Image (cartoon, rainbow, N blue to C red):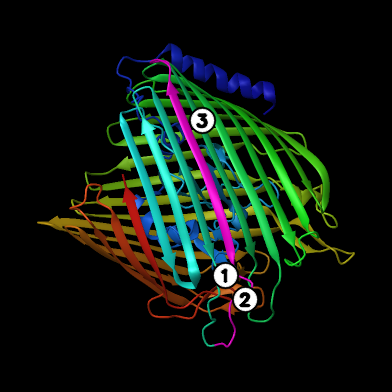
Amino acid sequence: MNLKGLFIFVLPIIFAGSLYSQKDAVVINLNAFSISIAKVNDFSKGYHTILISDSLVARNIRSLTDILKFNSFIYFKENGLGMVSSPSFRGTSASHTAVIWNGININSQLNGQIDFNAISANSYDNISVRSGGGSVLFGSGAIGGTIHLDNLIQFSEQESHKIVANYGSFNTQHISYDYMKATDKSFINIGLGTNSSDNDFNYLDSNLTNGNGNYFNYNFDANYGYKFNKKHQFKFYSSTFFADRNLSRTLNAPSNDGYEDLNSKNLIEWNFFLSPKEHITSRVSYIFEKFKFFDNNQNKDIFSEGNTERKIAQIDYNNSVSRKLKINGILGFEAVSAYGSSFDSNTRNIFSGVFSLNHQLTKKLSYGIQFRKDFQNDFESPFLYSLGIEQKLNKNYTLSFNTSKNFRIPTFNDLYWQPGGNINLQPEDSYQFEIGNAISFKNISFQVNGFYIKSSELIQWIPNEYDVWSPTNTDETRNIGLEFSANYKTAFKNNILEINANYSYTDAKDLETDQQLISVPKNRFNALFNYQHKSWSAFYQILFNDDVRFLVDTISAFQVSNVGINYELSRLKNKPNIGFVIHNIYNKKYQNTLNRPMPGINFQITTTINF
């Protein structure tokens, strides 16, 4: 489909929806409106989404990695505590999990990944995990699943100050301050935070210490909104994160490497409400990322570096045509430039068109469809589609199905790295099918999803005929798996008991070698038991990871548990909260990446003050 064909296909549908809008349309709540959250909710038919609560964030505030590995299906490969952390979702690689910040895909343009220890854990009002392919809505890399980080701007009278302070083992420290003030016309939110650690824990069953592992980082976040009238709203989001960390030694060798990275994300939105059911959002974003790598952190005059700049513009049209029908159309343009020590300055321009429809066909049957086509200056992008169906069989049981075609474009490192870059690479293709079963009763609910992913043209770095490592489109993979989640909650008198559990089975194979893919555990399980009595609460977390193949070796299966207690000083005016957590309470020896041990038993004290 060419550019002209895309306009012919998308625009008439958009404007037709506007012309034939019905009187029973859903009215949008203008005081608590988020385009990105609404998109996940409205156009995810047949997909499973997990919402991470504020209490879970508070318990694992030292990193986003900790939050997600104990409360989702995602396996994280960590090069030690606080070091580089990359995800494996449904057996896919780190570049196949897309991170969406307020509706914008923020995966690195250099390597296609996100380091989850380089994202502030307490900068967001809403963290959710969406399983399954999402390239139609969220762009390149959304093959295994997507992680959504959203800030909510609300126009209602409120004002708050929040201070969180943590201290833990290895001289690990965190302090953050969050201020929010809002009226029926304006909203402002400012957040500041810093983390640091000597990170010098002893390796279990060894006389070695985690040398060269110290780090510090800080974040600055600002969110602003202004409602001019019933039809016009202005919103601004900004998030900056800086980290300076040394890279820990392994069991085999010491290290004196260092790494600095700076990420800045900025987004302006203008919401124009044509009616209570129809609106257009204009969006402009500027994203900057930069890193420096030091072979010797004692001599920071010598380093390698890389940086990218992204300028994004979008027109996003939404129409709740009726209570049964919603449509969305997006036209976007993105200009990317990159520079690095290992490649010259390069640019990429992308024009994209997206169309989405969600239809409640009958009282019990609904479906959603999406289409996407990108046009780029350096190669051809595939035409993408997604179809999801939900059938409510009775009040307790819903059957769902989805299928989609997804993709990942080659990164700047893949194309231009010297020596070895390959400018002839093709985008990775992936097809996915999924069946879901949702069962819910008064106090308990279950979700069971079976999935199948077939991927081709995977980009793999291998030695070429000159013995230089170079990327090429070679591998075909097949991922089959099962995800099971259960949630139970009950309350009696002054007591609340809550249990959440997630289990996944993943059989991910390279079809050429018929071997399980590296860094993919077949079985993975986590659970949270939480009990609350008046001002007291206690929790117990457990995480199990199966054996993981890692190149020619194997990382042994492990089980690790955390336990914690919290007390709210309810008699004081602002009800401050004090918490104590013991991580790895059974002092288990374990690794997520070969020869890079994680710490044994360690503690964390948390204080939260609201005023």
* Secondary structure at numbered mark 3: strand
Residues at marks 2 and 1 touching, judged by CB atoms closer than 8 Å: no
Nearer the viewer's eye, disc 3 or disc 2? 2
Residue type at mark 1 is: Gly
Q: Position of residue 189 (x, y in %)?
A: 43, 36
Coordinates of residue 117 in the picture (x, y in percent)? 55, 58
Q: CA–CA distance between discs 3 and 1? A: 35 Å
Residue type, label 3: Phe
Tell me which numbered mark, 2 or 1, is placed earlier along the sequence: 1
Q: Which labelled disc corresponds to residue 236? A: 3
The disc, 3 or 2, on the residue closer to the chain's N-terminal end is 2
Residue at disc 2, secondary structure: loop
Query: Magenta span covers which residues?
Result: 206-231
- Residue drawn 33% across the image and 35% down it: 159
Disc assigned to residue 211: 2
Q: Quadrant of the N terminus?
A: top right
